[in-house]
Amino acid sequence: MTLSHTEAAPHSPEEPPLEPPLEPPINVSNAECGESMIAPPSPGEEEGEVKLPSSCNSHESVLVPPSGKDKGYAWVVVLAVFLVNVLVAGYVKSFGILYILILESFPDTSGAAAGWILGLLAGCRGLLAAVMGAFTVLMGPRACVIMGSLCVAAGLLAAAPAASIVHIAFTLGALVGVGLCMSETPGYLAVTDYFQDKRSLANGFRASGNPLGGVLFSPLVVALHQHFGLRGALILMAGVMLHMTVLGALMRPFQIHQHLVQAEFWKDNARQNTPGLRIPSSQQVRTSSQKTKKKKPLNFRILKNPAYLVYLVMVMCINIALPNALLYTPTYGKSIGLSAYENSLIASYTSACDFVMRLLCGWTSSLKLYKAHHGLIAGLVVGGIGCLLTPLCNSMWQLLGAATLLSFCMAFFWTLINTQLADEFGGDDMASTWGFFRMTQGTCSFLYPSLIGLVIDTTGGLAMPFVMMGSALLLGGAVFSLRPFVAKISGSKKEQNLQSSSSLRGEPVA
């Protein structure tokens, strides 16, 4: 905290009060110890007294308004994000069941035509992440989630009377994919805004909604289809997804929340009539609370940062495994003679294990037991070992062991990646860093399934695809371990460029 001072300027009681300062300092005083006005603290600061210069009267004190982060309504927001993740991930992970039901309703559909449904769903959900991040910055998380929920419901309702697979592809695929992207992207940004010291714990709770949705939605889709048929199931699922509008309404923009916290703080101090403390007017509080750094919808300069490019290369490597290893595990189980019941046990165990490990990862990371990037690398290495061991499994229990290692990888990666991006590149650029990250992932989601299918057709089995996925996870961990060295080298080059440019201009080099 720094103290900002103005010149002593005595004024009569008839004169209007001093205008709020252009920058939000901790106090503005007459000769360092007159009337004082308090402005919002920097992120992470808590309520408390600020020491004044020794020349000030001892009976005058300055209070710093509290931050709205890491407490109170912040946990309401993270609960809303958690439930949105349950709905979004539940729909995506249960879409395999819907996909089978759609093919049964349209038996003449070719595999290539049906593939457009999955491609548009995964592609729109990932490729538009940067655009939806910018929309969140401009319009706020509340509006973005509500519009996304309406878009998902519209896609499900429009698909109910569909008479062709093309109609299904553009409704359940494209329209629902856009809505899911609009619904889930603001949650990542909201958690970053509302949490500082407990960000890892909050991200662990947020991320645990994904596997829980996978556990809950699959039996729900089956039950709805049995009682109401495919069209009825789509209509009722639209009603379920509309619950995201209520959850989105709870995602109050952090700037508004911080203003409300400060306004309540000043009201409480005004009631207490603290001696020697000047309480600014509501207009002054509003003016000072609005003087925060304005976020950019998209920051394309981040793509010139070599340290950030390491993240993009890493996700290109691991994206062949993280969404696909889990999908192909039941197929491998069937190839070694496991029954449908045993495969369902493995799928349920994997989701439950993923849920528990995400909570555990968020909790241990918040305790600072290890650095986030070390946990992320460890998760990728463990997941790579699990994929490499999968072709050696010959029983359900062995496959459960390999699935446990894969669950560890997914839990640590999806819990820590958001925290790592925010800590390294700042929360203000989270819309850009997370958006481009997800955009890269979405692009790879178009390419890798076809590559895996080609390998399966060529080799006639799943051993080679799992070796590829395990090797890709290990390679991603190795790439990410180079991040500190890349950042150090790029920082040294920037410093050398600054020194050379200063010498050319004849300026002294510090």
Image (cartoon, rainbow, N blue to C red):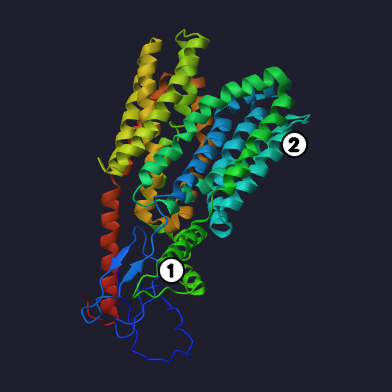
Question: Looking at the image, how many numbered discs can be counted on the residues?
Answer: 2
In front of the other: 276 or 106 = 276
**Tag 1 secondary structure:** helix
In front of the other: 84 or 423 = 84
Q: Amino acid at mark 2?
A: Ala
Q: Could you tell me which residue is drawn at 29 percent across and 35 percent down?
A: 378
User: Which marked residue is nearer to the observer: mark 2 or mark 1?
Assistant: 1
Q: Could you tell me which residue is drawn at 62 percent across and 30 percent down?
A: 115
Q: Quadrant of the N terminus?
A: bottom left
Q: Residues within 10 Å of mark 2 (few under 14, many from 20)?
A: some
Q: Amino acid at mark 1?
A: Ala
In front of the other: 228 or 414 = 228
Q: Which residue bears the numbered disc 1?
A: 270
Q: Which residue bears the numbered disc 2?
A: 158
Residue 281, horizontal then vertical, whole percent: 48, 74
Residue 295, horizontal then vertical, whole percent: 48, 62
